[in-house]
Amino acid sequence: MADHADVAIIGAGVIGCSVAFHLARLGRPSVCLVEKEPLPGSGSTSKANGGIRAQFTTEINVAMSLASMTILDALADEIGEPPLYQKAGYLFLTDDPARLSAMTAAAAFQRARGVSVEVLDAAGVRAKAPYAAGPILGGTFGPRDGFIDPGGLTNFFLREATRSGVRALYGAEVTAIERGESGAYRLLTTAGEVRAPVVVDAAGPFAGRVAALVGADVPVEPVRRHILISGPCPSLPRMIPMTIDADSAVLIRREGNRVLIAYSNPDEPPGFNTAFDPDFPLRIAEKLDARFPAVGEAGLDIKRSWAGLYEVTPDHHAVIGPIPGLPGFFVVAGFSGHGVMHAPAAGRAVAEMIVRGRSESVDVAALSIERFARGEAIHETMVL
Ligand SMILES: Cc1cc2nc3c(=O)[nH]c(=O)nc-3n(C[C@H](O)[C@H](O)[C@H](O)COP(=O)(O)OP(=O)(O)OC[C@H]3O[C@@H](n4cnc5c(N)ncnc54)[C@H](O)[C@@H]3O)c2cc1C
């Protein structure tokens, strides 16, 4: 017997769960989340650092971040304690004059769009990050930026969605998608069949593979990304902003009494490999010691460190919206490292498209898949 729903969402990560939550809030809870793993949120969502920031250089990234922050603020009372969104700030620092002037211009762009961001001189940076060593010219600080608990947010969306009637099918890998004469889709899964007139591809790094099942070309590639955890590091303050050395691209934040360290390896090839590369720490050791010596001294705890997959598009912006020629088939994927922070706004936008025919809360037209064919790729310079 096939399972019938108004909307089938492929993928129960933070994105799929946000779409389900917002559909339920818009009064459309006939939704089936279809997830290949035995648990929700166990894909890229479980590997994320959880940063949220509005310090970006494209209209759409700023708009998505501000819309997500507004949704998170509005949900704060409902979420309760402990809060999922902590406004510890994002601090970008540099010793490069050209980079500082680009960061100053970016801050002006952001302020004009309602982002609160301060430009700091060297003393201002050192006051916020006394643990940053070496020469520093200045930086920027966004006080509304900070961290989200990725698993907590996914669970909140899922809990509220299922309370409203949304169903979830786990251990159900979608292996084929057919379109019947009525226009409804048949999802063939390893746990049975699901039929729905509307399908949302929220399969994260697998979104391109899922789209290919209906013959659509969605350019989302998986790229491995490492997170390192230091040994206990008592000398840093208990709470620090996400601190990014823009010159070396090493970033740190607190993780309990330890420190979480991230760095984007420019040589990482696309692929589904999530094995931890034992050579990865060598890439950052010198940079870490130079800028954050207390963290370097604390050493790395490789057993607690991990690797996961970014879901990357050619212009490092998500694809959100319908696929031309496939009525009722939507994609919401390819967040390129910003999927947790943009999940609230992205889920709301897709739910509005399905229920109201267009996204009303945030204009996501720039993220349509047609931008690639039209040569309208978006260029973001503050990519981490
Ligand atoms: C190391 C690291 C650090 C990160 N840091 C940040 C950060 O600081 N801030 C931020 O905003 N983002 C960050 N990200 C990115 C963020 O994790 C992702 O953008 C986000 O989790 C994407 O969510 P998703 O729901 O689209 O994908 P996923 O969480 O991967 O969910 C997709 C789901 O689809 C399921 N699925 C796939 N194929 C099928 C199929 N055929 N049938 C059924 N189910 C299927 C998968 O099992 C998975 O559960 C980071 C990512 C990594 C790896």
Image (cartoon, rainbow, N blue to C red):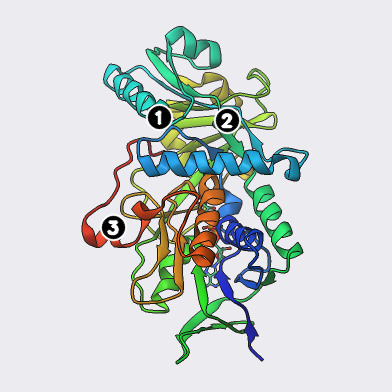
Q: Which residue is painted at 46% across and 30% down in the image?
A: 114
Of residue 191 and residue 361, the one placed in the foreground of this image is 361
Crowding around mark 3 (Cα neighbors within 10 Å: few <14, some 14 to 19, many 20+) is: some
Of residue 283 and residue 363, the one placed in the foreground of this image is 363
Q: Is residue 267 visible?
A: yes
**CA separation in Å, label 1 and label 2:** 23 Å
Disc 2 secondary structure class: strand
**Residue 378 vertical placement versus 222 (above, below):** above
**Residue 114 vertical placement versus 162 (above, below):** above
- Quarter assignment of residue 298: top right
- Considering the image in quadrants, where does the C terminus appear? top left
Say the numbered circle drawn on residue 110.
Answer: 1
Disc 3 secondary structure class: helix
Can you name the residue that lies furthest to the left here? Answer: 375
Disc 1 secondary structure class: helix
Q: Looking at mark 1, is its residue's CB closer than 8 Å to ligand 1?
A: no
Q: Which residue is painted at 41% across and 79% down in the image?
A: 214
The residue that label 2 is drawn on is: 253
- First along the sequence among labels 2 and 3: 2
Which amino acid, by three-letter code, is at mark 3? Arg
Q: In the rendering, at what x and y percent does residue 176 appear?
A: 48, 83
**CA separation in Å, label 3 and label 1:** 23 Å
Can you name the residue that lies furthest to the top here? Answer: 123
Q: Which residue is painted at 26% across and 20% down in the image?
A: 98
- First along the sequence among labels 3 and 1: 1
Disc 1 versus disc 2: nearer the observer? 1
Q: Is residue 50 visible?
A: no
Q: In the rendering, at what x and y percent does residue 230 appear?
A: 60, 32
Q: Which residue is painted at 57% across and 76% down in the image?
A: 173
Which amino acid, by three-letter code, is at mark 1? Gln
- First along the sequence among labels 1 and 2: 1
The residue that label 3 is drawn on is: 371
